[in-house]
Image (spheres, coloured by chain):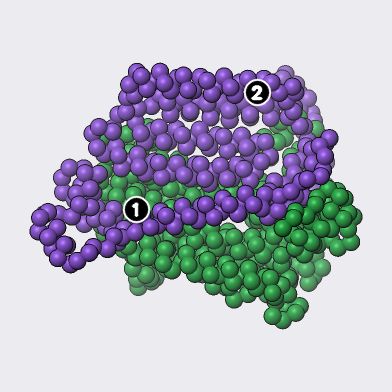
Amino acid sequence: MADFLIGLGLPGWLAWSIAALVAAVLLLNVIAGGALVFIWAERKIAARIQDRLGPTRTGGRFGWLQSLADGIKLLAKEDLMPEGADGLLFRLAPYVSFCASFCAFIALPFAFDVVGQRLNVGVFFVVAVLGLEVFGVILAGYASASKWSLFGAMREAAQVVSYEVPLGMCVVVPVMLAGTMDLVTIAEKQSGWMSNWYLFHDPFTFVIFWVYVTCAVASVNRAPFDLAEAESELVAGFHTEYSGLRWSFFFMAEYGSMFLVSALAAVLFLGGWNGPVPIAQLVGLSEGTGDSAGYFVRLLGLANLIGKATFGVLLMMWVRWTLPRLRIDQVMTTCLKYCTPIAAVMFAGAMFWQLFLPGGLLPGWSRPAGEIREGWLEGPGGLSATSAPAAVRSAGVAAAESSDSSGLAKRSPR
Amino acid sequence: MTGMLDMDISSMMHAIVPALATTALPALPMAGINWHSVLFLLFAGLACGFAVGVVAADNVVRMALYLVFSLGATAGLFFLAGAEFLGAMQLMIYVGGTLVLLVFGVMLTAQAPFVSIKPSSSDRTLAAVAGASLLALLLTAAFSVDAWMAPGAGVVPAPTATPLGMALIGVRVDTPPSGSPSGGRVGYMLPFEIVSVHLLVVLVGAAYLARAKRRRTPRAIDAVASAMPVEPAVVATAAVTAPGRTTGGAKSALVGGGR
């Protein structure tokens, strides 16, 4: 886009600023608009699960303007701060939470070439930034000068630090299959029919997807893992003392993170923006072209990804209103005694599957993974450009070939 | 249809925007600014400013927070330099690791002696000497470099993660710096393995130290229980949170995790 603006005659700095601003505002709208819709959906789903109707009046038939009315109410609320609170940190905490949630969206691809900033280490970046959200919670708990808040924050800290371990292990498996940490490439590699999704790659990835779901729910602090705001014990946990707009920032961060981990699950395991049936490819359209057909295919991919992520969020809501809250020791048991060992075993399993059955059980059913797909290795200027195969099987082969072709790299003595 | 629309709009924009650019913008001198340097100075200034804040603050939690911001700005510097893997690593390990520091800060500051930390003058002197000598060393090293590489314009940084990962498993695929001999370029398999095993040992050791201790005989538990009205862990909880009643939430929050 920046190139387009430069082409129009704008100076470079202005073009880049406008392009960055457009991307940032779009992402902000994903979070804010998403929160509006999801809060409404959550109220309706909760009501239906509990045999109620939920909001029905505001904005016509289904109460679909309820979130907006809530937003106006929150804007008009008095902004209170407890007397003993640490003012600076109290004011800062909601923004820290929100910024962490927002920053992680930067590296998330929504469709082919529709990504805020394509990072070579996208997965890693998203997981790292998502882990920073807990800072806001801890600061809020500390700065509120309230025991309820402090307990909530301490629980959150213990929980998030523990669950990052199995979450990281789950995320590593698709990275291993794709041979890259680039989210765009990972999603591209799952294009085609549904059987190319990493969810169906082998039994281990199927299991580890559900471990990922568990850990993701825990890491975004949703029921049944919402001990930080256990309303039956801690009033409202870390946001007990917050009101008005500051409080709503916490909620936007929460719903933003829910959407983010769902979208990450979609990219890592559910084919990203590739639908279950490659309609566009069957018709003969390609997303890589820059004409309007290409843009239409990208729009289709965008709808695909947002649909998958929304499905993930709705799944979390369903879980929240179905399962009772766990105790803190049960939360820790789930993490340390179940999720972590299962994730470790599945990781090893996926590794051996990759080693011994790289083509899958049925040849031709699913695409073999594990080639090095990094463009700089195989592109026109890449190291393996002169060697015959475009996609190199394994690291050792890659090194051998590149040393054959260019003499730059040598295999190290074992 | 859509294509025609696109063409119309873009041709219109082509007509309008240069006019705008030439009428409204030429007065601004911004085109000549090296934005890479501006961003570098911004991040570097943030990092240094918050680092000073860490030293100047007297509240443990605020110190930890400033440290987080300082380290985050350093991660921004890494991203700016195109070292995405290093930047993400910085975020995950250093910024994320400070989380634990923050937790300890929160737990400590509920007690009176730690709310405000004021170092003694001897501490200050010692820290100033150590800091100044390190700064002098770094500055000497910095100014001894003949020519710093200028921020490249339009240089696409090569991906950083794959060469790193392959170097760690013993294969170097990156191009050597010009002029250096390409021979003898081995990977880092052995250091990687040593560090891995070392970390594993540390992990096992930590788990061993933190395990639930098994009491020798059930009698001992009775004796302890009769001698002390409450368990030591609960006393610790009460001391950590605040003098006064500990609620069920406190026990489950702080004690229950260890069981």
Foreground: B26 or A177? A177
For the residues carrying marks 1 and 2, which lies nearer the camera in this image? 2
**Disc 1: CA contacts within 10 A as few (<14), some (14-19) or many (>=20):** many
Does residue A212 appear to the left or right of A379 in the view shown? left
Image coordinates of residue A207 in percent, x first then y, are: 54, 73
In this rendering, the answer to whether A351 lies above or below B142 is: below
- Image colour for chain B is purple
Q: Chain for mark 2?
A: B
What amino acid is labelled 1 in the image? Arg
Q: Can residue B216 be seen in this view?
A: yes
Height in image: A33 above or below A82? below
Residue B2 position by quadrant = bottom right
The three-letter amino acid code for the residue at tag 2 is Ala
Question: Dot 1 corresponds to which residue?
Answer: A155
- Look at 71% across and 23% down and name the residue there: B145
**Which image quadrant: the C terminus of chain A?**
bottom right
Tell me the residue at 37%/63% (across/down): A331
Chain for numbered disc 1: A
Q: Do labels 1 and 2 share a chain?
A: no
The image quadrant of residue A205 is bottom right
In the rendered structure, find residue B142 and report the number of the disc placed on it.
2
As drawn, is B171 to the left or to the right of B44? right
Q: Is residue A394 placed above or below B112 in the rendered structure?
A: below
Chain with colour green in the figure: A
Residue B87 position in % (x across, y down): 60, 42
Q: What residue sits 68% from the left and 55% below the top?
A: B169
